[in-house]
Image (cartoon, grey):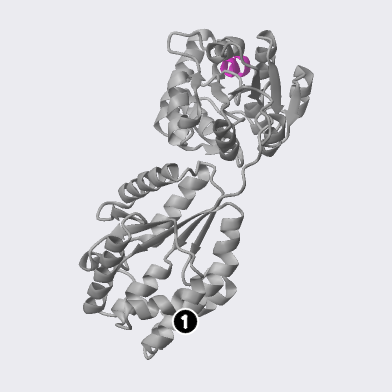
Amino acid sequence: MSTLAYDAVIFDLDGTLTDSAPGIVNSLRQALEMMQLTLPGEGIVREIFLGPPIITGLQRHYGMNEGQAFEVLRIFRDCYHERGHLENTVFPGVRALLKALSDQGAYLAIATGKPQIATEIVLRALNLWHFFDAVSGPLEEDDPLIDKATLIKRVLPEGKRAVMVGDRETDISGAKALGIASIGVSYGYGNREELIKARPDALADDPEALFSLLGVERPEPRGYFISFEGNDGAGKSTQARFLAQRLERLGYPLVLTREPGSSQVGEQIRDILLSNANTGMAPETEALLYAAARAQHVREVIQPGLKAGKVIISDRYVDSSITYQGAGRQLGTEVVRQMNAPAIGGLMPDATVFLALSPQEAQKRQHAREKDRLELAGSAFHQRVDAAYQALIAAEPDRFLVVQATGQKQDTAELVFRSVMERLRRDGIG
């Protein structure tokens, strides 16, 4: 095990841990438009609005007096709190870095020019809050031009070897004013020339470089497998996509896949299986084709992704064959389970999201679109499928995350996200 280079690591937020530029820029654009002003070009925005206090940029670029700048800042904050904070992503590698530092007992803190309340909202929304021992941002009673050294000092622990990690000159100068080490990150909103002039103790061109600079080992890749199941029409594909987008924004390395499909062989089998031209397909043929597509899927997509430490989200997996061919086609659930044993090689999901929606309600949702061959199988078929799903859930209650899918898509997405995040935290995945 490596020895930590510092006992305490204090991070800037925007441009260091998260890419908040889209939310900041869009919120600033809205605020300026309300004042009948136009956002400047990208170069100017990056230089004076991403990192330094926004009020400074307003006065510098638009020549505003203090009162005018404060009014634009007030509107900007309202826009950012309403929507802008959601347009924020964790830089790749940052989540693994924070977890590694936390696991090795480092004191972790944030010192940022973003207001304290907004900072806490962002950290919670991005599921980063639990990593930090302390957070420092301007309070309501603070001057918005509060210097970085003061913000760092608020979270600087006594008697520890400390380092400040940030992307702007102010982060480096703030650390120097307090006599602590500093690391500049060139992947953020500053630039390499600015950081070199500030003379940090080290430079990192990407989050991966911070592992060695902070003396922390890169953890062994640990993948996680999530499948989505449910009756046809429950919204599996939509919810799998929503979850993938949200987890990716939180910095999880991710693969979104589906069954049958997600490989050249699998997609060709999918076309055969779902085509309405193949109504005469024997149930045994159907089951074997699903197993064949799954074997390719496991070996070409799922296993490599897990080995690389990625979160795999699959729209359907072997439970679908057990319920649809085993129960729906009445081949027998154990027969189909054994048929798929060579295909999966013992690989089962770490968690399975089951979207709970009755077959009757699911069929109503499908009414407006063309149905594939399985969706046309009839109500008795789908009742047997549903009963088989309930039996699987009863047999493996810990694996299944049952989420009610009767509401609107976004409401269901929020339920899925909360359920999955609780499971990821329980299982130690970031």
Q: List x then y, in percent, for residue 419.
A: 35, 47
Instruction: Pinpoint residue 69: horizontal percent, then vertical percent.
Output: 51, 14
Q: Residue furthest front?
A: 1
For the N terminus, give its image quadrant.
top right
Q: Is residue 266 visible?
A: yes
Alpha-carbon neighbours of circle 1 within 10 Å: few (<14), some, or many (≥20)? some
Q: Is residue 352 above or below residue 75?
A: below
Q: Is residue 89 magenta?
A: no
Q: Quadrant of residue 199?
A: top right
On the question of residue 376 being in view, the answer is: no
Q: Is residue 332 above or below residue 386?
A: below
Residue at the spot 74% in from the left edge and 20% down from the top edge: 200
Residue at 56% x, 52% y is 310
Toward the viewer: 145 or 162?
162
- Image point (53%, 74%), residue name: 295
Report the magenta stretch's main SS.
helix
Could you say where residue 382 lies in the image, as x and y percent from the top left? 26, 74
SS of the residue under disc 1: helix
Specify start and end residues of the magenta stretch as a single range: 56-63
Q: Which residue occupies the foreground of this view, 359 or 6?
A: 6
> x%, y% of residue 129?
46, 30
Q: Residue at x 31, y 58 (%)?
A: 355
Q: Amino acid at mark 1?
A: Leu
All told, the count of numbered labels is: 1
Residue hosting label 1: 289
Q: Looking at the picture, does residue 43 appear above or below residue 48?
A: below
